[in-house]
Image (cartoon, rainbow, N blue to C red):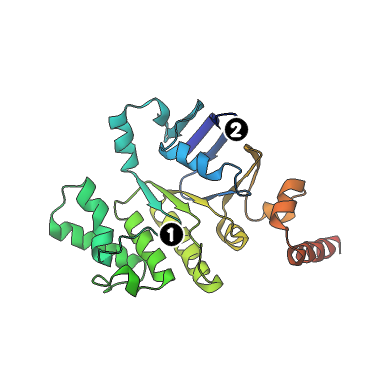
Amino acid sequence: MIEVKDVNKSFGENHVLKDINTEFKKGVVNMIIGQSGEGKSVLTKCIVGLHKPDTGNIFFDGRDFTAMSRLDKKAIRQEIGMLFQGSALFDSLTVEENIMFPLTMFTNQTKKEKLDRVNFCLNRVNLEGRNKLYPAECSGGMQKRIAIARAISMNPKYLFCDEPNSGLDPKTSIVIDNLIRELTYEYEMTTVVISHDMNSVIEIGDKILFIHNGQNWWEGDRKSIITTENQEIVDFVYASDFMKEIRASMQVKRAN
Protein backbone atom coordinates (compact mmCIF):
# COMPACT_ATOMS: atom_id res chain seq x y z
CA MET A 1 0.00 0.00 0.00
CA ILE A 2 1.09 3.56 -0.73
CA GLU A 3 -0.05 6.38 1.58
CA VAL A 4 0.06 10.05 0.64
CA LYS A 5 -0.22 12.39 3.61
CA ASP A 6 -0.62 16.19 3.47
CA VAL A 7 1.42 16.54 0.28
CA ASN A 8 1.91 20.03 -1.16
CA LYS A 9 3.98 20.95 -4.20
CA SER A 10 4.54 24.34 -5.82
CA PHE A 11 6.58 25.59 -8.74
CA GLY A 12 7.24 29.24 -8.08
CA GLU A 13 3.85 30.83 -7.41
CA ASN A 14 1.96 27.94 -9.00
CA HIS A 15 0.58 25.80 -6.16
CA VAL A 16 0.05 22.52 -8.04
CA LEU A 17 -0.78 20.08 -5.22
CA LYS A 18 -2.75 21.21 -2.19
CA ASP A 19 -2.87 19.02 0.93
CA ILE A 20 -3.26 15.72 -0.94
CA ASN A 21 -4.31 12.86 1.35
CA THR A 22 -5.07 9.46 -0.12
CA GLU A 23 -3.98 5.85 -0.17
CA PHE A 24 -3.48 3.31 -2.94
CA LYS A 25 -4.24 -0.20 -1.78
CA LYS A 26 -2.49 -3.43 -2.63
CA GLY A 27 -4.08 -5.84 -5.10
CA VAL A 28 -6.48 -3.35 -6.73
CA VAL A 29 -6.27 -1.01 -9.73
CA ASN A 30 -5.95 2.54 -8.40
CA MET A 31 -6.61 5.24 -11.00
CA ILE A 32 -5.79 8.95 -11.00
CA ILE A 33 -7.94 11.09 -13.29
CA GLY A 34 -8.46 14.78 -13.93
CA GLN A 35 -8.07 17.44 -16.57
CA SER A 36 -4.68 18.18 -18.09
CA GLY A 37 -2.57 20.42 -15.87
CA GLU A 38 -4.40 19.54 -12.65
CA GLY A 39 -1.41 17.79 -11.03
CA LYS A 40 -1.80 14.07 -11.82
CA SER A 41 1.71 13.62 -13.18
CA VAL A 42 3.21 15.87 -10.50
CA LEU A 43 1.60 13.73 -7.80
CA THR A 44 2.95 10.57 -9.39
CA LYS A 45 6.44 12.08 -9.68
CA CYS A 46 6.28 13.03 -6.00
CA ILE A 47 5.33 9.47 -5.10
CA VAL A 48 8.25 7.88 -7.00
CA GLY A 49 10.72 10.55 -5.90
CA LEU A 50 11.26 12.49 -9.13
CA HIS A 51 9.87 15.57 -7.35
CA LYS A 52 10.33 16.32 -3.68
CA PRO A 53 7.11 17.49 -1.97
CA ASP A 54 7.33 20.90 -0.32
CA THR A 55 5.51 19.43 2.67
CA GLY A 56 3.98 16.06 3.48
CA ASN A 57 5.05 12.44 3.37
CA ILE A 58 4.86 9.38 1.10
CA PHE A 59 4.78 5.93 2.70
CA PHE A 60 5.45 2.63 0.92
CA ASP A 61 3.99 -0.08 3.15
CA GLY A 62 4.68 2.06 6.20
CA ARG A 63 8.17 3.15 5.09
CA ASP A 64 8.55 6.93 4.95
CA PHE A 65 10.01 7.43 1.47
CA THR A 66 10.34 11.20 1.83
CA ALA A 67 12.58 10.86 4.89
CA MET A 68 14.88 8.20 3.42
CA SER A 69 18.48 8.54 2.35
CA ARG A 70 19.31 8.33 -1.35
CA LEU A 71 20.54 4.74 -0.89
CA ASP A 72 17.32 3.65 0.83
CA LYS A 73 15.24 5.35 -1.86
CA LYS A 74 17.16 3.42 -4.51
CA ALA A 75 16.15 0.16 -2.80
CA ILE A 76 12.48 1.21 -2.87
CA ARG A 77 12.71 2.19 -6.55
CA GLN A 78 13.87 -1.34 -7.37
CA GLU A 79 10.46 -2.48 -6.10
CA ILE A 80 8.72 -0.20 -8.62
CA GLY A 81 7.74 -1.08 -12.19
CA MET A 82 7.02 1.72 -14.67
CA LEU A 83 4.90 1.65 -17.82
CA PHE A 84 5.57 4.89 -19.68
CA GLN A 85 3.08 6.68 -21.92
CA GLY A 86 4.95 6.01 -25.16
CA SER A 87 6.19 2.55 -24.07
CA ALA A 88 9.77 4.00 -24.10
CA LEU A 89 11.38 0.91 -25.62
CA PHE A 90 14.95 1.08 -26.86
CA ASP A 91 14.72 1.00 -30.66
CA SER A 92 18.22 -0.48 -31.04
CA LEU A 93 17.53 -3.39 -28.68
CA THR A 94 15.51 -6.53 -29.38
CA VAL A 95 12.40 -7.38 -27.40
CA GLU A 96 14.46 -9.75 -25.29
CA GLU A 97 17.15 -7.15 -24.62
CA ASN A 98 14.54 -4.50 -23.70
CA ILE A 99 12.95 -6.74 -21.08
CA MET A 100 16.33 -7.91 -19.82
CA PHE A 101 17.62 -4.35 -19.42
CA PRO A 102 16.47 -3.74 -15.79
CA LEU A 103 17.62 -7.22 -14.80
CA THR A 104 21.09 -6.44 -16.15
CA MET A 105 21.13 -3.03 -14.44
CA PHE A 106 19.87 -4.01 -11.01
CA THR A 107 20.50 -7.72 -10.41
CA ASN A 108 23.38 -10.18 -10.36
CA GLN A 109 21.44 -12.91 -12.12
CA THR A 110 23.17 -15.21 -14.58
CA LYS A 111 22.37 -14.96 -18.29
CA LYS A 112 20.24 -18.09 -18.04
CA GLU A 113 18.29 -16.74 -15.06
CA LYS A 114 17.65 -13.48 -16.88
CA LEU A 115 16.56 -15.26 -20.05
CA ASP A 116 14.21 -17.50 -18.05
CA ARG A 117 12.63 -14.40 -16.51
CA VAL A 118 12.33 -12.70 -19.92
CA ASN A 119 10.60 -15.75 -21.37
CA PHE A 120 8.28 -15.96 -18.37
CA CYS A 121 7.28 -12.31 -18.77
CA LEU A 122 6.78 -12.65 -22.53
CA ASN A 123 4.60 -15.69 -21.97
CA ARG A 124 2.58 -13.78 -19.35
CA VAL A 125 1.74 -11.03 -21.86
CA ASN A 126 1.04 -13.57 -24.63
CA LEU A 127 4.13 -12.74 -26.71
CA GLU A 128 6.11 -15.94 -26.35
CA GLY A 129 8.71 -16.50 -29.06
CA ARG A 130 8.98 -12.81 -30.04
CA ASN A 131 12.39 -12.40 -28.38
CA LYS A 132 14.40 -11.42 -31.44
CA LEU A 133 12.02 -8.86 -32.90
CA TYR A 134 12.83 -5.15 -32.74
CA PRO A 135 10.26 -2.58 -31.53
CA ALA A 136 9.85 -1.20 -35.07
CA GLU A 137 8.66 -4.66 -36.15
CA CYS A 138 5.90 -4.68 -33.51
CA SER A 139 2.45 -3.08 -33.53
CA GLY A 140 1.47 -0.43 -31.01
CA GLY A 141 -0.41 -2.98 -28.92
CA MET A 142 2.54 -5.37 -28.96
CA GLN A 143 4.88 -2.57 -27.88
CA LYS A 144 2.64 -1.83 -24.91
CA ARG A 145 2.68 -5.51 -23.91
CA ILE A 146 6.47 -5.61 -24.26
CA ALA A 147 6.68 -2.53 -22.03
CA ILE A 148 4.42 -4.24 -19.49
CA ALA A 149 6.65 -7.33 -19.60
CA ARG A 150 9.65 -5.10 -18.89
CA ALA A 151 7.77 -3.34 -16.07
CA ILE A 152 7.09 -6.66 -14.30
CA SER A 153 10.51 -8.21 -15.02
CA MET A 154 11.80 -7.26 -11.56
CA ASN A 155 8.67 -8.71 -9.91
CA PRO A 156 7.67 -5.28 -8.53
CA LYS A 157 5.50 -4.60 -5.51
CA TYR A 158 4.33 -1.32 -7.07
CA LEU A 159 3.33 -0.68 -10.70
CA PHE A 160 2.84 2.80 -12.19
CA CYS A 161 1.19 3.17 -15.60
CA ASP A 162 1.10 6.52 -17.38
CA GLU A 163 -1.67 6.64 -20.01
CA PRO A 164 -1.30 2.94 -20.90
CA ASN A 165 -3.87 3.18 -23.73
CA SER A 166 -2.47 6.29 -25.38
CA GLY A 167 -2.53 5.88 -29.18
CA LEU A 168 -4.28 2.51 -29.15
CA ASP A 169 -7.53 1.51 -30.83
CA PRO A 170 -10.51 0.69 -28.55
CA LYS A 171 -10.20 -3.10 -28.91
CA THR A 172 -6.48 -3.15 -28.13
CA SER A 173 -7.10 -0.77 -25.22
CA ILE A 174 -9.41 -3.37 -23.67
CA VAL A 175 -6.67 -6.01 -24.02
CA ILE A 176 -4.18 -3.75 -22.21
CA ASP A 177 -6.73 -2.86 -19.49
CA ASN A 178 -7.50 -6.51 -18.84
CA LEU A 179 -3.80 -7.39 -18.73
CA ILE A 180 -3.05 -4.67 -16.18
CA ARG A 181 -5.97 -5.81 -14.03
CA GLU A 182 -5.02 -9.50 -14.29
CA LEU A 183 -1.39 -8.81 -13.31
CA THR A 184 -2.48 -6.59 -10.41
CA TYR A 185 -4.79 -9.25 -9.00
CA GLU A 186 -2.44 -12.17 -9.71
CA TYR A 187 0.67 -10.65 -8.11
CA GLU A 188 -1.16 -8.44 -5.58
CA MET A 189 0.74 -5.36 -6.71
CA THR A 190 -0.13 -1.81 -5.72
CA THR A 191 -1.02 -0.50 -9.18
CA VAL A 192 -1.48 3.21 -9.94
CA VAL A 193 -2.77 4.21 -13.38
CA ILE A 194 -2.95 7.76 -14.75
CA SER A 195 -5.60 7.90 -17.46
CA HIS A 196 -7.85 10.17 -19.51
CA ASP A 197 -9.60 7.14 -21.02
CA MET A 198 -13.01 6.97 -19.37
CA ASN A 199 -13.64 3.52 -20.85
CA SER A 200 -10.62 2.28 -18.89
CA VAL A 201 -11.72 4.08 -15.74
CA ILE A 202 -15.17 2.51 -15.82
CA GLU A 203 -13.78 -0.90 -16.85
CA ILE A 204 -10.97 -1.44 -14.33
CA GLY A 205 -11.06 1.42 -11.77
CA ASP A 206 -11.29 -0.32 -8.38
CA LYS A 207 -10.33 2.94 -6.69
CA ILE A 208 -10.52 6.28 -8.51
CA LEU A 209 -8.94 9.55 -7.36
CA PHE A 210 -10.15 12.69 -9.14
CA ILE A 211 -7.71 15.61 -8.95
CA HIS A 212 -9.29 19.05 -9.40
CA ASN A 213 -7.69 22.41 -8.66
CA GLY A 214 -4.73 20.55 -7.18
CA GLN A 215 -6.90 18.80 -4.58
CA ASN A 216 -8.15 15.24 -4.16
CA TRP A 217 -11.63 16.43 -5.03
CA TRP A 218 -13.41 13.09 -5.16
CA GLU A 219 -12.72 9.42 -4.50
CA GLY A 220 -14.79 6.41 -5.47
CA ASP A 221 -14.84 3.39 -7.75
CA ARG A 222 -16.03 2.47 -11.24
CA LYS A 223 -19.61 2.07 -10.06
CA SER A 224 -19.94 5.23 -7.98
CA ILE A 225 -18.36 7.42 -10.68
CA ILE A 226 -21.35 6.66 -12.91
CA THR A 227 -23.94 7.62 -10.31
CA THR A 228 -22.23 10.49 -8.46
CA GLU A 229 -23.84 13.91 -8.44
CA ASN A 230 -20.55 15.69 -7.82
CA GLN A 231 -20.73 18.44 -10.42
CA GLU A 232 -17.02 18.57 -11.22
CA ILE A 233 -16.93 14.81 -11.84
CA VAL A 234 -20.09 15.02 -13.95
CA ASP A 235 -18.60 17.83 -16.06
CA PHE A 236 -15.39 15.82 -16.54
CA VAL A 237 -16.81 12.37 -17.27
CA TYR A 238 -19.78 13.57 -19.35
CA ALA A 239 -18.02 16.38 -21.22
CA SER A 240 -19.31 15.50 -24.70
CA ASP A 241 -22.91 15.82 -25.88
CA PHE A 242 -22.96 12.07 -26.55
CA MET A 243 -21.94 11.25 -22.97
CA LYS A 244 -24.49 13.74 -21.64
CA GLU A 245 -27.22 11.88 -23.57
CA ILE A 246 -26.05 8.59 -22.05
CA ARG A 247 -26.18 10.09 -18.55
CA ALA A 248 -29.69 11.48 -19.15
CA SER A 249 -30.83 8.05 -20.38
CA MET A 250 -29.35 6.37 -17.30
CA GLN A 251 -31.10 8.83 -15.00
CA VAL A 252 -34.44 8.11 -16.68
CA LYS A 253 -33.93 4.37 -16.22
CA ARG A 254 -33.08 4.83 -12.53
CA ALA A 255 -36.17 7.00 -12.04
CA ASN A 256 -38.38 4.29 -13.53
Residue at which label 2 appears = 14
Residue at which label 1 appears = 86
Q: Residue furthest right?
A: 256
Residue 77 disc label: none
Q: Amino acid at mark 1?
A: Gly
Q: Position of residue 236 (x, y in %)?
A: 70, 53
Give the structural element (helix, strand or loop) at label 2.
strand
Q: Is residue 2 above or below residue 161?
A: above
Compute the Cα span from label 1 to label 2: 27 Å
Q: Amino acid at mark 2?
A: Asn
> Which residue is painted at 16% across and 51% down in the image?
109
Q: Nearer the viewer, residue 198 or 63?
A: 198
> Which residue is painted at 50% across and 68% down in the image?
168
Q: Residues within 10 Å of mark 1 (few under 14, many from 20)?
A: some
Q: Position of residue 13 (x, y in %)?
A: 59, 29
Q: Position of residue 127 (x, y in %)?
A: 33, 71
> Which residue is painted at 41% across and 57% down in the image?
186
